[in-house]
Image (spheres, rainbow, N blue to C red):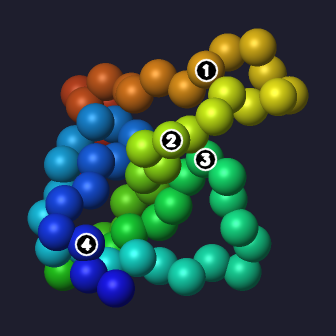
Amino acid sequence: MIITQVTDVYGLTHENCKLIETENDFTRIFLAEGPDGTRYTCLLPDAKPNPKSNQHFEYGNPADAPY
């Protein structure tokens, strides 16, 4: 399945990505692969806070992204 646009956990936007099927279902994230084969971890739009933690997810700083 091709997705036109995704935003990764660093807040960076990527175009023309496809969803990666995983063995385990994740409740807060999904994996997307760009046209060059790079995989990105993305936050679901309706991600709920983790019940094991009292903190909610926040996007990271794009300057901290590993390039």
Question: Could you tell me how far apart the alpha carbons at marks 2 and 3 are, in whole angstroms?
Answer: 8 Å
Question: Could you tell me how far apart the alpha carbons at marks 2 and 1 are, in whole angstroms?
Answer: 12 Å
**Circle 2 — which element?**
loop
**Circle 4 — which element?**
strand
Q: Is residue 46 left or right of residue 39?
A: right
Residue beneath disc 3: 28
Residue at the front extreme of this rendering:
46
Q: Amino acid at mark 2?
A: Asp
Question: Could you tell me how far apart the alpha carbons at marks 2 and 4 are, in whole angstroms?
Answer: 17 Å
- Residue 60: where, in percent of width, then height? 39, 27
Residue at image position (34%, 85%) is 1
Residue beneath disc 2: 46
Residue beneath disc 1: 56
50, 46: nearer the viewer: 46
Q: Earlier in the sequence, mark 2 or mark 1?
A: 2
Q: Establish if 51 lies above or below 7.
A: above
Q: Amino acid at mark 4?
A: Ile
Residue beneath disc 4: 3
